[in-house]
Amino acid sequence: ATDADVKTESLSSVQQLGVEMTVRYGKYLNLLKENAENGLCFVLMNCEKFLKQQQRTVESPLCCLQEHCAGYDWFASSVFLIMSGDREKTFTFLQRFSRLLVSAFLWLPRLHISVHLPITTVESGIHPVYFCSAHHIEMLLKAELPLVFSAFHMSGFAPSQICLQWISQCFWNYMDWSEICHYIAICIFLGPDYQIYMCISVFRHLQQDILKHTEA
């Protein structure tokens, strides 16, 4: 795809805000140069264009199914920063990465209203990461960290909810950049189940704080 192919596409206000945040973060990390915003927009618009070709048409009152775009693409933005703002390298990587099973778990927009999912799953509006990774996180949390699991249970707040937030945002605003890179690399090289282990390890790291807040 070329610049001419995507000129007719436009980013939503949410995406534009995400682009501003990503570029600001990238410059703070000394990963991006001037005019990086154009390169990131190119990547996001091309991703949206190609992912649309594998999406279903769904009639549903659910707001999340009425949009072709599943919010801001934090994974593509992370790859853009890893590639130091090189849009061609980023897009080439994403094209090849999309063929791997792990892309379904790391790159959430990859399976948004996708033809690769059963129609019943699509109509539910629930991403597979929620009933796969997040479900197994809760099972492991109960076995490995029963006190943390009980604390969440008493609060009436499911740990899977916060995990889905972490995963969808690639741990942005929760971990340092080097740790985010490690998370992405580990899941790609060792398998998507390491996404589950990563979340459990974060809960283990936060265990004392969680229990302290529960008592208070």
Image: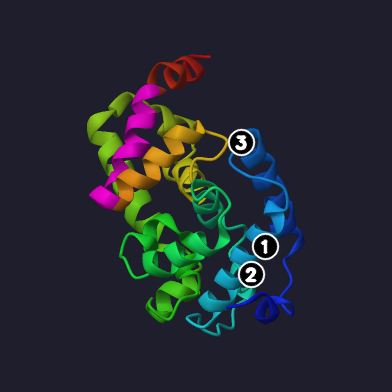
Marks 1 and 3 sit apart, C-alpha to C-alpha, by 19 Å
State whether residue 195 appears in this view: no
Element type where label 1 sits in the image = helix
Give the mark, 2 or 3, whose residue is nearer the N terminus. 3
Tell me residue 59's x, y (percent): 59, 83
Q: Which residue, given by chain and number where applicable, does mark 1 sit on? A: 41
Q: Is residue 74 magenta?
A: no
Label 1 or label 3, whichever lies nearer to me, is: 3
Q: Amino acid at mark 2?
A: Met
Q: Which residue, given by chain and number where applicable, does mark 2 sit on? A: 45
Element type where label 2 sits in the image = helix
Which is nearer the eye, 157 or 136? Answer: 136
Give the mark, 1 or 3, whose residue is nearer the N terminus. 3
Render colour scheme = rainbow
Which is nearer the eye, 186 or 143? Answer: 186
Q: Which residue, given by chain and number where applicable, does mark 3 sit on? A: 30
Q: Main secondary structure of the magenta part?
A: helix
Span highlighted in magenta in the image: 189-205
